[in-house]
Image (cartoon, rainbow, N blue to C red):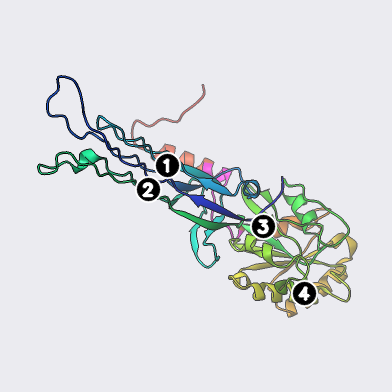
Amino acid sequence: MHFLDQAKIYVRSGAGGPGAVSFRREKYVEYGGPDGGNGGRGGDVVLEAVAGLNTLIDFRYSQHFKAPRGGHGMGKDRTGASAQPLVIQVPVGTQILSEDKEDVIADFTEVGQRITLLEGGLGGRGNASYKTSTNRAPRQHQPGEPAQEMWVWLRLKLLADAGLVGLPNAGKSTFINQVSNTRAKVGDYAFTTLVPKLGVVRHKAREFVLADIPGLIEGAAEGAGIGDRFLGHIERCRVLIHLIDISGSGPGQDPAEALQVIEEELAAYGAGLEDKPRLVALNKLDLADQELADAFAQELREAGAEKVFALSGATGQGVEELLDAVLAYLPAATSTETKGVEREEDADGGEEGETNWSPI
């Protein structure tokens, strides 16, 4: 599936149905009069966040969305049918922006969130509603309210608990493949990852979502390399994992320089990324000895890193310690062992008449 995180779409609600002009004329019925019904309400345009979507690729091939209009009013005081709303499904994490991208209209962060973006027009009045004691044969009616229309931008920001950052070829794809269920492309060249990847990490009876974004290089904020457009996908992360290649992340760049480059790019992007907690990790430990790792770790601490982990994404060495540190930044969750203890306590201290369920 192709990844797309921005799309521009046109939406239009349904116009209200026009009211009817009709007169009752029946044989043997005295005092016929106006009986034109009102028009029906036009359809609303509704956006809904649903599970199972992680891209906006569907909106590349379908950019125009128009809700149906309301039904016409009819004789015998029959009101036109109201149109059904047009529901547009978007992934969780989608933001709805105005056409100029200046205003955030909606931000979907949970499954099931809905917003009525445009309301359908009200139906017009039929001539029966204009009848009065002095105007017994009205011929006026309303055409119904017109439709509303607008262009909006959809911008997807993936929801993840932790995010991977680093220079190209720092081993981020290898790491996420090691700890999660994803299968990101791995290659011995820069910018192997071209679009963000999500993986679910299961560690010590806990689960969290890990996001891998394309590598950053110096000047990414000005558009160098792939640029910083994918940094939006880690804005919602609780903690950032900064992977650094222990063997050298680029020509003339040692780990301390690599740390500085990424810190400067995060600060240039803004949006609070520079204030998020960081876990700095020296990756590819299998390509270096422990003495070199200790020396680089000391250098990174002097450059501002609070704690430095040494690991190998390829072999799994040192990965568990880093994942333990990630769990400390996640919301408290009950492990399977704790749940069992709570069930026993509930059984002892529960209300009278409660019994433990048993399959036998």
Residue type indicated by callout 4: Glu
Question: Marks 1 and 3: in contact by CB < 8 Å?
Answer: no
C-alpha separation, residue under disc 3 versus residue under disc 4: 31 Å
Give residue 58's mark.
Answer: none
Q: Earlier in the sequence, mark 3 or mark 4?
A: 4
Q: Which residue is mark 3?
A: 324
Q: Residue 175: x and y, percent?
A: 77, 55
C-alpha separation, residue under disc 3 versus residue under disc 1: 56 Å
User: Which stretch is magenta?
Assistant: 328-339
Q: Considering the numbered disc 4 on the image, is that residue within a helix, a strand or a loop?
A: loop
CA neighbours of label 2 inside 10 A, class few (<14), some (14 to 19), many (20+): many
Q: Which residue is mark 1?
A: 69
CA neighbours of label 4 inside 10 A, class few (<14), some (14 to 19), many (20+): some
Residue type indicated by callout 1: Arg
Q: Which residue is mark 4?
A: 218
Q: Is residue 288 magenta?
A: no
Question: Marks 4 and 2: in contact by CB < 8 Å?
Answer: no
Specify the quadrant of the image occupied by residue 292: bottom right
Q: Residue 214: x and y, percent?
A: 75, 61
C-alpha separation, residue under disc 2 versus residue under disc 3: 55 Å
Q: Earlier in the sequence, mark 3 or mark 1?
A: 1
Q: Is residue 34 visible?
A: yes
Q: Is residue 207 left or right of residue 193?
A: left
Q: Earlier in the sequence, mark 2 or mark 1?
A: 1
Q: Residue 223: x and y, percent?
A: 73, 71
Q: Provide the major secondary structure of the magenta segment.
A: loop
